[in-house]
Amino acid sequence: MLLHLKRGLTAALILALTLTLGVPALAADPLASGGFVKVAISAKNSDSPTLDLDLALYRRNSSNAFTKVESMDYVTPVNRLTKDMTFQLTPQAQQVSLTVDYLTDLNGDGVYELLSGQDRPVGDVLSTDGTLTSASSGVSTQLTQGRTYSITGNDLLSRGQAAIQDRTTAGSASYLSDLSSSTSQADSILYMLTIAYQSSSDNKKYEQCYYVHLYDQLPAPSAADFRDISPNAWYYDSVDYVVSQGLLSGSTRSTFSPDQKLSRAMLAQTLYNIAGQPDSTISHYDDVPQEHWSYAAVSWVTSQELMAGTSPKQFAPDQSLTRQEMALTLFLYAQSQKISTSQRADLSVYADEDKVADWARTSMEWAVSEGLLAGRTVGGKTVLDPTGNVTRAEFAAVLKTLCQDVLA
């Protein structure tokens, strides 16, 4: 079971992908690259952040009781789904089976328990007739080629609750004596669904592994979802705020890219999000077609005269913003929201005050006075760096201040 687990860890797949795990480049079986099964996962709401998981492996000892033998932690994508989910698989070959392992956290310490059954299987299998049943029941597990099988969220929750009951009831075959006082529910389980294919071409076993966590409502995004955001980073709380509020999203499902430069499209989209994504007019920029992810936002900010194109037909959505360009746009947005923008800061304390453009001076004085911008130390001098770029981490801090202190 331990070997199976390690293979599963390196092979965990993101939601709805059907690529195989760790398959040799020269595998003799052409189905080894993932063609042995088709998978589709549906749910009202879903995401799949890459998370750092802690796991405790339990094996039976000489007295047949489960005891902890190993601890491990690893990083893997986890499919977070609402409980209305359906997991469908259609075998494309013979000798395909599916097993479900229940990774419980019975004492709530954040470490998942995985039971290794060795010669006495623990967990469930999908039987030929399409039901989840105990792996020790002896039912046929070779799924029918071409048939579509479905596992619902309710199926997993029901079997998961049974697993918890077994692990917390003295005398059961899966009893964990040191964790028996738990009141865990089935929605706290991390469900590990492993699809295995025993190839008749090279007599090797290939697997796809999906980690599923079920929710009534998905948890709000947080900085902890991103692998490139350290809890000790100065901007951690700011990133946590902006992503949880839906103001700024990650660059991918598992990365935030804090050092990436803020683009014109990103600023447009963020202001559009803050405003509640109101109806917008039609955009006529050649470089922001209707299918562009920022189309509605760009249309709206230009219609509100918060931002303008770089030319009549170009918006330059990917162009990086300078600090003074960002300040002007935020200044205009505050005014559009009937927020007082009369506050001013003295920019003469900055060594590069003369670098501030005339068109940006008022907005820069306002932004500094509101704490949206602060000086930078360059060569031992405090500078405002008006033409410098803004990183996504810096913008997260600006956004938090804007929303909590200026617009509130």
Image: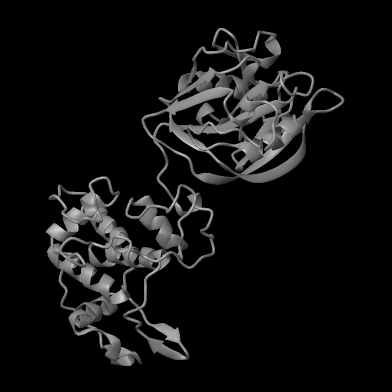
Which of the pair 255/66 is nearer the observer? 255
Q: Nearest the camera: 315 or 98?
A: 315
Q: Is residue 14 left or right of residue 65?
A: left
Q: Is residue 330 above or below residue 144?
A: below
Q: Quadrant of the C terminus?
A: bottom left
Figure quadrant of residue 107: top right
Quadrant housing residue 201: top right
Q: Nearer the viewer, residue 354 or 116?
A: 354
Q: Residue furthest right?
A: 62
Going 73% across and 42% down the picture, which residue do you hit?
71
Locate the N terminus by quadrant.
top right
The residue at the point 64 percent across, 12 percent down is 142
Is residue 126 toward the left or the right of residue 225 in the image? right
Would you say 267 lies left or right of 204 here? Answer: left
The image position of residue 355, as x and y in percent, is: 29, 87
Q: Is residue 286 left or right of residue 389?
A: left
Q: Is residue 112 visible?
A: no
Is residue 120 shown above or below 332? above
Q: Where in the figure is residue 250, as x and y percent of width and height?
A: 42, 53
Instruction: Evaluate whether residue 222 shows in this view.
Output: yes
Q: Position of residue 210 (x, y in %)?
A: 56, 32
